[in-house]
Amino acid sequence: MQMNGFYKKIRLWIIGILGVLFAGYILFVFGRLAFSLQPELVRRTPGVERGSIVDRNGKQLAVQTNFFHFGVTPKMIKDVQAFSEAVAHILEKDPDEISALITRSQNSSFIYLKKKLSQTTYEELSAIIDENGYGSFCRFDRIPGRIYPENDLASQLIGYMGDAGTGLSGIEYSQQSLLSPEPGSNSTETVYGKNIYLTIDANLQYRLEKISKAAMESTQAESLMLIAASASTGEILSYISLPSVNLNDYSTALPIQTLDRPAVSAYEPGSVFKIFSSATFLDAGSIAPGTSFLCDGVYQRTTSRGERIRITCLGHHGWVNVRDALKYSCNDALAQMSDTLDTDSFLSYIHRFGFGDRTGVEASAETRGIVKDQDDRMWSGRTQATMAIGQEISVSALQMVQAATVIANHGVPVRLTFIQRITDKDGNPEYIHAPKYGDRVLKASTADYILSCMETTARSGTGTRANLGDISIGVKTGTAQMADPVNGGYSTTDFISNCMAIFPVEDPQIVLYIVIEKAKGETYAGRIVAPVIADAADEIIDHLGMNREGAASLEHSGRISINHNAPLSVGSVVPDFTGRAKRDLIPLLGIEGITFQINGEGWVVGQSPAPGTPVTENMSIELYLE
């Protein structure tokens, strides 16, 4: 048999050699892989479950949830218009807008149509996609998120978590490492953050915010601050900065809504500061309670350097002592008092009160304020006198409250705090706040005397509109011109109106401080802030159950009418449960995916989260009955 020319021996040898070489290469690579060290398997990245932020009673204020980013692969969509019309109402967008975006992105492998969809929206959209067979080109990306059930309540304090899972402001920022700890390098298990119990009481916060918003509206003010703190523990029970921001819509907020004014704003406090300067002169012994000063309407003198100083007073008060000076808010008398004490001693007391330094509260940012010293180029012959009346010194609202705890606590300051306790994911406490007292600033007799002077101011001085009648209260009002950033000096139209209150006088429990900024029309603090102090103090007293004289009683005929309400159900949003009887709530306990917590007996008077909040997976709804 004759061999075909294609199969000549030389060609067969070449093919055979190449085959052997290839087989040898395969064996070599296999052997190297078999006997070499194998790379370590990539470990699964552990998940992090962010801790919750709740009020002192456990009401949820910031809760971990899931959001969904929704996107598509444009080139895989056959009928763009039909798809756009099918999903538009769920995405709350115009069909033509969606269609145009998809058409413009035909060369893109993937685009997002909307981010941060709620659980409810995700479920509704998934149903439409499944029903229409859109699953081949649609995708949902699940991302960790945050729901703020109380919307704008204490918003600057709570703060905000961004899309990256990192706190951007407030407690969300300052306690980031506790709320969302970094997993260990060898960890593969889910890491759980701590739960932060704030010192604020959400129900009290709500009531005081309602009072504050009404005050802003009536005064047409630009902003308002309110802090209510426990005088003995330093725990802040209410913390308000208006205008505020809905934390569920933080990305669209204006800067003025996100500003944490009590912590970051530094301003001249005006006459409220006189309680601290008066206490300084008394405690240092440069004056006594009975020392009198003649107020003729103006303080004026010429220094040894020829500098002429002139400070006007609101009236001609005649001979006044410390009590009278605070009662009438006499600039002349306070300026004269400042001449009795050397500057080093004066500034030492100011710093011991805490001015010029941060309070150390768990805020994401805090100003030091400004306290000049004698080396400051802006120091002049009038500086000490004007500081004594609350000018030429910048403070924060937090500093003012902490300084007031010195007077409330018989001369000893207590450190302010926003955190009442910290627990693990199972509720086991890992930290419980205990009061932290500072070094004594004033003799107990000095602090008590100043507080009695503040009570006089409430009874018959500039703070009479803050007087409660049935519970003793000490107050001091102050109205200060604000700096004019355009023309320099002081503005003739913009004022800081503020008032400090401590009550009850015989057993101080609460320090309450309110600041109204840039009110329109009336700006005198005794007229616009003192009444707000009275309203807020009344609310605090009733909420805490303090004993008071003349408690209101209610007459009732004894007859009640019972309305037959329709059965309750829960759809895509949380309904309004207000006014429903406890028996109406029983069927709700069987709803899967929602946990109900019922507190008290009777009828629903409050709920968390608020009506209209989107229902999410594994949501907890808390109801309060009375």
Image (cartoon, rainbow, N blue to C red):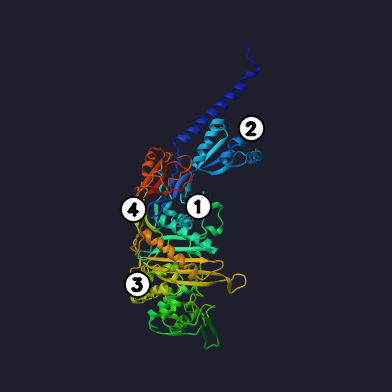
- In front of the other: label 2 or label 3? 3
Mark with earlier residue (2, 3): 2
Q: Which part of the image, by quadrant, shows the N terminus?
A: top right
- Looking at this rendering, what residue extends furthest in the top direction? 1
How far is disc 1 from disc 3 in space, using C-alphas? 39 Å
How far is disc 1 from disc 2 in space, using C-alphas? 38 Å
The three-letter code of the residue at mark 3 reads His
**Label 1 sits on residue:** 247
Q: Secondary structure at mark 4?
A: strand
**Label 2 sits on residue:** 79
Q: Residues within 10 Å of mark 2 (few under 14, many from 20)?
A: few
The three-letter code of the residue at mark 1 reads Leu
**Label 3 sits on residue:** 410
- In front of the other: label 4 or label 3? 3
Residue 622 coordinates in the image, percent (x, y)? 40, 47
**Pick the front one: 318 or 378:** 318
Give above or below for 101 relative to 327: above
- 145 sits left or right of 448 in the view: right
Q: Residues within 10 Å of mark 1 (few under 14, many from 20)?
A: many
Q: Which mark is residue 267?
A: none
Q: Which mark is residue 429?
A: 4
Give above or below for 381 relative to 154: below
- Judge whether residue 260 can be spotted in this image: no
